[in-house]
Amino acid sequence: MTPQYMMAAGAPKPVAPFSHAVRVGPWLFVTGQMPTWPDDDDRPLPLGVEAQTRRVMDNLKIVLAAAGCDLSHVVQARVYLTDFARDYQAMNATYRSYLAADRLPARTCVGVTGLARGALVEIDLVAYRE
């Protein structure tokens, strides 16, 4: 299988040299999304982890849609938080609001010392669609 490297129209500009997603057969690997705005890269990040998590999830939905997928195809997620103790519960509540109760992907959540652009949260995904 030959990988397909994808840039999603309407998704935020990458903050580093990467593709928005890479498809290999039925697998889609979605690069971690930041809480940046698709229409204005210079716009300040949303305030607070809830607003940033919403922006990240909406950005992920844009990338998934460009690849013919949606959140129901996600089988694994990785969440990165810069202040785990403070933001874990609030991020979880917002993240959960985007997913069907019977289709929760496997997930890892880790605390990190920093994220690009001073973000509080970043999330990457693996999706599966035949």
Image (cartoon, rainbow, N blue to C red):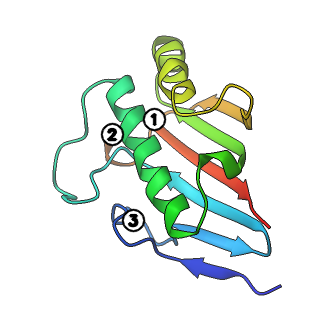
Disc 3 from disc 2: Cα separation: 15 Å
Spot occupied by residue 77 in the image (x, y as percentages of width and height):
67, 42
Amino acid marked by disc 1? Val
Amino acid marked by disc 3? Pro
Asked if residue 110 is positioned above or below residue 24 in the image, the reply reads above
Q: Secondary structure at mark 2?
A: helix
Nearer to us of marks 2 and 1 is: 1
Nearer to us of marks 3 and 2 is: 3
From this viewpoint, which residue is outermost toward the right?
1
Determine the image quadrant of residue 1: bottom right
Q: Secondary structure at mark 3?
A: loop
Spot occupied by residue 54 in the image (x, y as percentages of width and height):
39, 35
Q: Few, some or many C-alpha atoms within 10 Å of disc 3 (few <14, some 14-19, many ≥20)? A: some
Spot occupied by residue 44 in the image (x, y as percentages of width and height):
18, 43
Q: Few, some or many C-alpha atoms within 10 Å of disc 1 (few <14, some 14-19, many ≥20)? A: many
Determine the image quadrant of residue 99: top right
Residue denoted by label 3? 14
Q: Position of 73 compared to 36: left or right?
A: right
Disc 2 from disc 1: Cα separation: 9 Å
Residue denoted by label 1? 121
Pick whichever of labels 1 and 3 is earlier in the sequence: 3
Q: Secondary structure at mark 1?
A: strand
Of 47 and 68, nearer the camera is 68
Going 27% across and 52% down the picture, which residue do you hit? Answer: 37
Going 70% across and 55% down the picture, which residue do you hit? Answer: 127
